[in-house]
Image (cartoon, rainbow, N blue to C red):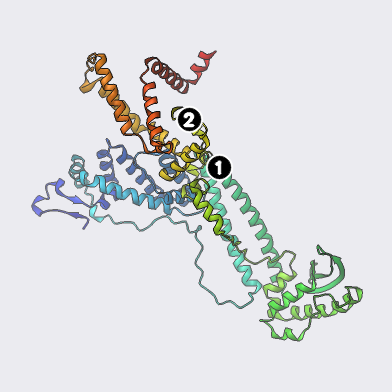
Amino acid sequence: LDCYSPSDEQESLPGRKVFAFSVLMESSVCREYLARFLQGEEVGKSLLSFWQDVENMKLSSKDEWHQLGNEIYQTYIKRPRPGIRLSKGVLKGIEAFIMANKGPEAFLQAQKEVYQILEERYYHSFLVSEAYHSMVTEAQNLHLDLGAYKEDDKSPSNSNQQEECVPAVAESLEPTVEECYARRKSQLTRLESRLDDKRRALQALQATPNSDPKMVRVLEKEIQEMRAQCSLLTDQLRRAHDWIQGLGKWTATIHSSQIVKDCSPKPMPYFTILVSTPDQSGWAVTKTIADFHCLRQRLLPMCPQLKQISLPSASKPRFRSFDQAFLDKTQPALQRFLDFTMKEEHLSRSEALYSFLSQSPDPLKEDLPAVKKNISFPLLQLFRNLSGPILQDSNEEDDDLYLYDKDLRDDKKDDVAVPLYALADELFELQGVFNLLRRALISFVQTYYGKPINRQLREWVSWVFSEPMQVYMLDMLRESLWPGGQLAPEWPRRSEQDQLAARKQAKALLLENLPHILDVVGQQNARKGAAKAFDVFQNVRLNKQLFYDLLEVIFAGVCPRAEASFMM
């Protein structure tokens, strides 16, 4: 049921009605009251706003999908909003849609995940809120039949991105040129449709502020390649159409022959064939005896009578070389073979004969993707496994994301952590084993955190300076300086004995709770280094100098022009 009412007597109490969450999300009035309820929840507002934007994208026309999808990507993913946490698979699907490689199914999956989070976190608390009571009252005043809302099964699907399901047709061993022409024409239609999608995606990226330049470059290159493919397919289809229109009129005549030294040191006989009709001039192609044998093998299943027509051997005559006498003897036999194939109607309609006489090789055949051979060497793999994550290539899904691609090349190194190595060398007295420390630290971080040092440091810095952390630190500062809204009283002055006791207690707590990452230098060295760092921070003058240096860096980052004029 879409709604539940405890009894008929309580119909006058609108707040007692309990509507299903699906009903609330389908009504714009209910969503407005839910947004008011979530006004003080940053996470809830972001989730509801994301769901609403994807819903608007679903209801819009197909021409607007890429523009709206780019806006959603820039608003909620490129600059993360609180609560929007999507899996890597969904992120890859969203980027594939932006690049016009897939449909918008990833957006629908993300919307479904956000819907579940909203229902689990906020639905029950919304039911007992004043906003829900006001919503039901207004729904009754407006005579809204919330129970009539049904789930809409319509969802955007990019039909052009998916291959059309064509019923299987029983094909002969050798397809006809008409069948190949129809398939190639269908391929051109799909390619042009994909090209239109790519153009819309590129226009959406160019119209979106702060779009990824690499995405734009990749799309421009793909569009250029697709245009070249469309042009090539159009030329092939035009020639195939001319061939189909002239079926029964085409003639193939061996005009001349000659012996040419090919790439191999042995000379090879070549035969020039003129293909034409009485109405129009044609073209010339050059073939070898081996090409004739290949054509015969392809046509034999269609016409067993070809066995009665013999072809000269493609190999060199024994104890002789190819000469003019051989050409004069071979040319009539090849001409008889051509005359027979051109007169037989089902042979003249075959794609094999058209490809043989065409100027381009296999003009109507589908290009098969090259199979990449994965040759494994067990011994090499053994050394890779023994070497740990240092020599292993990262195959994580996020390595393929444009979202993480900006710093991907730098993340595979550890140049950001170089100053930390010098600090560790000084603290832990690691003279002579610097490179060993570096490799051990890289291995530890990649194994423990599952990512390179650079990326771990970048994520840590981003987390420290994120908006929630800034709010948290400002709240802590406010509570420290103005607890309860009043200025904090001055701390009582402590004696030197109290300060020394507090210092010893803090040092003991630090040495007992060292982070695990320091285990790479040994526990004894880790304790010595931590104690040395603690003692350094007890120096008042050094702390003041450190504070002034940090203040200068912050000032230079916030006010670069003022810092430049100050330096002048």
Q: Is residue 554 visible?
A: yes
Residue 174 placement, left or right of 21? right
**Location of residue 49 in the rendering, given as x and y in whole percent from the top left corner:** 34, 42
The N terminus, quarter of image: bottom left
Q: Earlier in the sequence, mark 2 or mark 1?
A: 1
- Please report the residue visible at 49 percent of the width from the left and 67 percent of the height from the top: 165
Label drawn at residue 214? 1
Q: Using the image, determine if residue 421 lies above or below residue 369.
A: above
Front one among 538 and 529: 529
User: Camera-side residue: 387 or 156?
Assistant: 387
Please tell me whether mark 2 sits on a helix, a strand or a loop: helix
Q: Residue at x 64, y 67 (%)?
A: 365
Picture residue at 27% right of the left edge, 52% below the top = 22
Q: Quadrant of the C terminus?
A: top right
Mark 1: secondary structure: helix
Q: Quadrant of residue 292?
A: bottom right
The mark total stands at 2
Q: Position of residue 234 (x, y in %)?
A: 66, 60
> Tag on residue 425?
2
**In this rendering, would 41 be left or right of 408?**
left
- What amino acid is at disc 1? Lys
Q: Residues within 10 Å of mark 2 (few under 14, many from 20)?
A: some
Numbered mark located on residue 44 in the image:
none
At label 2, the amino acid type is: Asp
Given contact means CB atoms under 8 Å apart, are the residues at marks 2 and 1 in contact? no
Asked whether 302 or 443 is in front, the reply is 443
Compared with residue 239, is residue 545 higher up or lower down, i.e. above or below?
Answer: above
* Residue 209 in sight: no
Residue 261 on image: x %, y %: 85, 64
How far apart are labels 2 and 1 at the CA level? 39 Å
